Amino acid sequence: MTAIGVAAFAAALVSQAPAVPAPQAIPVAPAAPEGCFETLRKDGLALSSWPLRATKLAGGVVCEAPGGVSIRRGASGLRFAPPARVSCAFGLRLARFEAVVQEVAKETLGSRVRALKQLGTYNCRRMAAYPDLVSEHSFANAIDVASFTLRDGRTVVVERDWVRADRPARTPAARFLRRLARRLYDEKVFNVVLTPSYDEHHKNHLHLDGAAYTVDGT
Protein backbone atom coordinates (compact mmCIF):
# COMPACT_ATOMS: atom_id res chain seq x y z
CA MET A 1 0.00 0.00 0.00
CA THR A 2 1.22 3.49 -0.77
CA ALA A 3 0.71 4.99 2.66
CA ILE A 4 1.29 8.57 1.52
CA GLY A 5 -1.48 8.41 -1.06
CA VAL A 6 -4.07 6.94 1.30
CA ALA A 7 -3.04 9.16 4.21
CA ALA A 8 -3.35 12.34 2.15
CA PHE A 9 -6.85 11.48 1.00
CA ALA A 10 -7.94 10.24 4.41
CA ALA A 11 -6.73 13.41 6.12
CA ALA A 12 -9.03 15.46 3.91
CA LEU A 13 -12.00 13.44 5.13
CA VAL A 14 -11.53 14.01 8.87
CA SER A 15 -14.31 16.27 10.12
CA GLN A 16 -13.95 18.96 12.77
CA ALA A 17 -17.73 19.14 13.20
CA PRO A 18 -19.42 18.94 16.61
CA ALA A 19 -20.07 15.58 18.26
CA VAL A 20 -23.75 15.55 17.31
CA PRO A 21 -25.37 16.28 13.95
CA ALA A 22 -27.30 19.52 13.52
CA PRO A 23 -30.99 18.51 13.57
CA GLN A 24 -31.93 21.06 10.93
CA ALA A 25 -29.23 20.06 8.45
CA ILE A 26 -29.99 17.62 5.65
CA PRO A 27 -27.09 15.14 5.64
CA VAL A 28 -25.35 14.40 2.35
CA ALA A 29 -22.98 11.74 1.09
CA PRO A 30 -19.25 12.56 1.16
CA ALA A 31 -17.94 13.48 -2.27
CA ALA A 32 -15.35 11.27 -3.93
CA PRO A 33 -11.95 13.03 -3.84
CA GLU A 34 -10.33 13.58 -7.22
CA GLY A 35 -8.47 10.49 -8.35
CA CYS A 36 -10.00 8.38 -5.59
CA PHE A 37 -10.59 5.20 -7.59
CA GLU A 38 -7.14 5.33 -9.16
CA THR A 39 -5.53 5.84 -5.76
CA LEU A 40 -7.21 2.77 -4.30
CA ARG A 41 -6.25 0.64 -7.28
CA LYS A 42 -2.66 1.91 -7.25
CA ASP A 43 -2.41 1.10 -3.56
CA GLY A 44 -3.20 -2.53 -4.30
CA LEU A 45 -6.89 -2.97 -3.48
CA ALA A 46 -8.89 -5.43 -5.59
CA LEU A 47 -12.02 -3.50 -6.48
CA SER A 48 -14.45 -2.61 -9.20
CA SER A 49 -16.76 0.33 -9.79
CA TRP A 50 -20.16 0.12 -8.15
CA PRO A 51 -22.63 2.50 -9.75
CA LEU A 52 -25.56 3.14 -7.43
CA ARG A 53 -28.74 4.80 -8.60
CA ALA A 54 -29.64 7.55 -6.14
CA THR A 55 -32.93 7.20 -4.25
CA LYS A 56 -34.77 9.57 -1.94
CA LEU A 57 -35.60 9.13 1.71
CA ALA A 58 -38.38 11.10 3.39
CA GLY A 59 -37.21 14.54 4.44
CA GLY A 60 -35.22 15.39 1.33
CA VAL A 61 -32.28 13.06 1.98
CA VAL A 62 -30.74 11.53 -1.13
CA CYS A 63 -29.29 8.06 -0.60
CA GLU A 64 -26.27 7.69 -2.86
CA ALA A 65 -22.65 6.55 -3.03
CA PRO A 66 -20.49 9.01 -5.01
CA GLY A 67 -17.81 7.14 -6.95
CA GLY A 68 -19.11 3.86 -5.54
CA VAL A 69 -16.63 0.99 -5.33
CA SER A 70 -16.95 -2.70 -4.49
CA ILE A 71 -13.87 -3.82 -2.54
CA ARG A 72 -13.17 -7.54 -2.65
CA ARG A 73 -9.70 -7.59 -1.14
CA GLY A 74 -7.41 -5.09 0.52
CA ALA A 75 -3.75 -4.33 -0.15
CA SER A 76 -2.53 -6.82 2.49
CA GLY A 77 -4.71 -9.59 1.08
CA LEU A 78 -7.52 -9.14 3.63
CA ARG A 79 -10.73 -10.37 2.01
CA PHE A 80 -14.04 -8.58 2.61
CA ALA A 81 -16.87 -11.12 2.83
CA PRO A 82 -19.10 -10.18 1.19
CA PRO A 83 -17.33 -7.47 -0.85
CA ALA A 84 -17.71 -4.03 0.72
CA ARG A 85 -19.86 -1.83 -1.50
CA VAL A 86 -19.09 1.70 -0.35
CA SER A 87 -18.57 5.26 -1.55
CA CYS A 88 -15.07 5.90 -2.83
CA ALA A 89 -14.36 8.30 0.04
CA PHE A 90 -15.22 5.52 2.49
CA GLY A 91 -13.02 3.14 0.50
CA LEU A 92 -10.07 5.34 1.46
CA ARG A 93 -11.02 4.89 5.09
CA LEU A 94 -11.19 1.12 4.61
CA ALA A 95 -7.66 1.15 3.19
CA ARG A 96 -6.39 2.77 6.39
CA PHE A 97 -8.62 0.47 8.46
CA GLU A 98 -6.99 -2.59 6.91
CA ALA A 99 -3.52 -1.37 7.82
CA VAL A 100 -4.54 -0.80 11.45
CA VAL A 101 -6.30 -4.19 11.64
CA GLN A 102 -3.14 -5.98 10.52
CA GLU A 103 -0.93 -4.05 12.94
CA VAL A 104 -3.17 -4.74 15.94
CA ALA A 105 -3.71 -8.39 14.99
CA LYS A 106 0.03 -9.00 14.76
CA GLU A 107 0.62 -7.27 18.11
CA THR A 108 -2.14 -8.98 20.09
CA LEU A 109 -2.76 -12.28 18.29
CA GLY A 110 0.57 -13.06 16.64
CA SER A 111 -1.12 -13.54 13.26
CA ARG A 112 -2.42 -11.35 10.48
CA VAL A 113 -6.06 -11.29 9.35
CA ARG A 114 -7.06 -13.23 6.25
CA ALA A 115 -10.72 -12.20 5.99
CA LEU A 116 -13.47 -10.31 7.75
CA LYS A 117 -17.20 -10.87 7.74
CA GLN A 118 -19.27 -7.73 7.35
CA LEU A 119 -23.02 -7.44 7.90
CA GLY A 120 -23.74 -4.48 5.68
CA THR A 121 -22.59 -1.25 4.08
CA TYR A 122 -25.24 0.50 1.96
CA ASN A 123 -28.82 0.67 3.26
CA CYS A 124 -31.09 3.65 2.62
CA ARG A 125 -32.68 4.14 6.03
CA ARG A 126 -32.81 6.08 9.29
CA MET A 127 -31.01 5.03 12.45
CA ALA A 128 -32.57 2.14 14.36
CA ALA A 129 -32.14 3.82 17.75
CA TYR A 130 -32.73 7.41 16.57
CA PRO A 131 -35.42 7.45 13.85
CA ASP A 132 -35.14 11.23 13.45
CA LEU A 133 -31.57 10.84 12.22
CA VAL A 134 -30.34 9.38 8.94
CA SER A 135 -27.97 6.43 9.04
CA GLU A 136 -24.58 6.80 7.35
CA HIS A 137 -25.39 3.47 5.72
CA SER A 138 -27.66 5.56 3.48
CA PHE A 139 -24.52 6.99 1.87
CA ALA A 140 -22.46 3.76 1.79
CA ASN A 141 -20.38 5.62 4.37
CA ALA A 142 -20.42 2.87 7.00
CA ILE A 143 -19.65 -0.78 7.57
CA ASP A 144 -20.72 -3.29 10.24
CA VAL A 145 -17.98 -5.82 11.02
CA ALA A 146 -18.98 -9.07 12.76
CA SER A 147 -15.82 -11.20 12.78
CA PHE A 148 -12.20 -11.58 11.72
CA THR A 149 -10.58 -14.79 10.47
CA LEU A 150 -6.84 -15.04 11.04
CA ARG A 151 -4.31 -16.61 8.70
CA ASP A 152 -3.66 -19.32 11.30
CA GLY A 153 -7.34 -20.34 11.22
CA ARG A 154 -8.57 -18.72 14.44
CA THR A 155 -11.65 -16.50 14.35
CA VAL A 156 -12.42 -13.44 16.47
CA VAL A 157 -16.19 -12.92 16.77
CA VAL A 158 -17.41 -9.56 18.06
CA GLU A 159 -20.51 -10.91 19.80
CA ARG A 160 -18.56 -13.68 21.54
CA ASP A 161 -15.21 -12.00 22.25
CA TRP A 162 -16.02 -8.36 23.03
CA VAL A 163 -15.54 -7.40 26.68
CA ARG A 164 -16.98 -4.18 28.05
CA ALA A 165 -14.51 -1.35 28.61
CA ASP A 166 -15.10 -1.42 32.39
CA ARG A 167 -13.94 -5.06 32.58
CA PRO A 168 -10.50 -6.59 32.00
CA ALA A 169 -9.80 -7.86 28.48
CA ARG A 170 -8.20 -11.11 29.57
CA THR A 171 -8.16 -13.02 26.28
CA PRO A 172 -6.06 -12.14 23.20
CA ALA A 173 -9.27 -11.85 21.15
CA ALA A 174 -10.75 -9.36 23.61
CA ARG A 175 -7.53 -7.34 23.67
CA PHE A 176 -7.49 -7.28 19.87
CA LEU A 177 -11.04 -5.93 19.64
CA ARG A 178 -10.55 -3.40 22.44
CA ARG A 179 -7.28 -2.07 21.03
CA LEU A 180 -8.60 -2.01 17.48
CA ALA A 181 -11.71 -0.01 18.38
CA ARG A 182 -9.64 2.43 20.41
CA ARG A 183 -7.15 3.06 17.62
CA LEU A 184 -9.82 3.42 14.95
CA TYR A 185 -11.42 6.24 16.91
CA ASP A 186 -8.32 7.90 18.36
CA GLU A 187 -6.52 7.97 15.03
CA LYS A 188 -9.62 9.29 13.23
CA VAL A 189 -9.77 6.36 10.83
CA PHE A 190 -13.52 6.65 11.41
CA ASN A 191 -15.47 9.49 13.02
CA VAL A 192 -17.98 7.12 14.61
CA VAL A 193 -17.00 3.82 16.27
CA LEU A 194 -19.80 1.90 17.97
CA THR A 195 -19.26 -1.40 19.80
CA PRO A 196 -21.37 -3.80 21.89
CA SER A 197 -20.60 -1.49 24.82
CA TYR A 198 -22.59 1.28 23.14
CA ASP A 199 -26.06 -0.30 23.00
CA GLU A 200 -28.00 -3.47 22.18
CA HIS A 201 -28.27 -2.53 18.51
CA HIS A 202 -24.53 -3.18 18.20
CA LYS A 203 -24.20 -6.31 20.32
CA ASN A 204 -22.84 -8.40 17.45
CA HIS A 205 -20.71 -6.00 15.40
CA LEU A 206 -18.48 -2.96 15.23
CA HIS A 207 -20.23 -0.11 13.45
CA LEU A 208 -17.70 2.15 11.73
CA ASP A 209 -18.61 5.25 9.75
CA GLY A 210 -17.40 8.55 8.37
CA ALA A 211 -20.17 10.87 9.55
CA ALA A 212 -19.74 14.64 9.73
CA TYR A 213 -19.81 14.36 13.54
CA THR A 214 -18.00 12.17 16.07
CA VAL A 215 -19.21 9.48 18.47
CA ASP A 216 -16.88 7.44 20.68
CA GLY A 217 -18.88 4.30 21.32
CA THR A 218 -15.94 2.15 22.34
Image (cartoon, grey):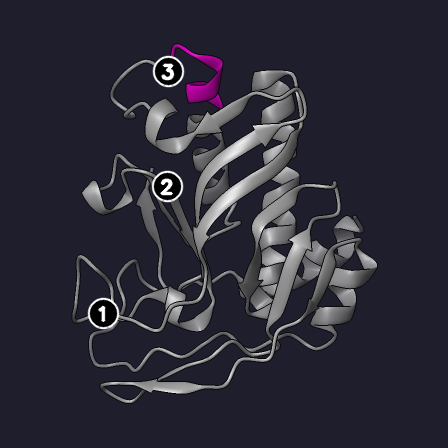
Q: Quarter of the image containing the C terminus?
A: top left
Element under label 2? Answer: loop
**Is residue 211 in view from this perspective?**
yes
Residue labelled with disc 1: 133
Magenta stretch containing residue 188, yes or no? no
Residue 127 x %, y %: 24, 63
- Could you tell me if the residues under marks 2 and 3 are in contact, i.e. CB atoms within 8 Å? no
Please report whichever mark, 2 or 1, sits nearer to the chain's N-terminal start: 1
Q: Specify the quadrant of the image occupied by residue 185.
A: top left
Mark pair 1, 3: CA separation: 33 Å
**Is residue 212 in view from this perspective?**
no
Q: Nearer the viewer, mark 2 or mark 3?
A: 2
Query: What residue is drawn where x is 53% and y is 49%?
Result: 189
- Checking the image for residue 6, the label placed there is none
Q: Is residue 10 left or right of residue 210?
A: right
Name the main secondary structure of what is drawn in magenta. helix
Residue 53 x %, y %: 50, 85
Q: Nearer the viewer, mark 2 or mark 1?
A: 2
Mark pair 2, 3: CA separation: 17 Å
Residue labelled with disc 3: 169
Residue labelled with disc 2: 205
Three-letter code for the amino acid on which mark 2 is drawn: His
Q: What's the magenta region?
A: 169-176
Three-letter code for the amino acid on which mark 3 is drawn: Ala
Nearer-the-camera pick, 11 or 78: 78
Please report whichever mark, 2 or 3, sits nearer to the chain's N-terminal start: 3
Three-letter code for the amino acid on which mark 1 is drawn: Leu
Element under label 1? Answer: loop
Element under label 3? Answer: loop
Mark pair 2, 1: CA separation: 20 Å
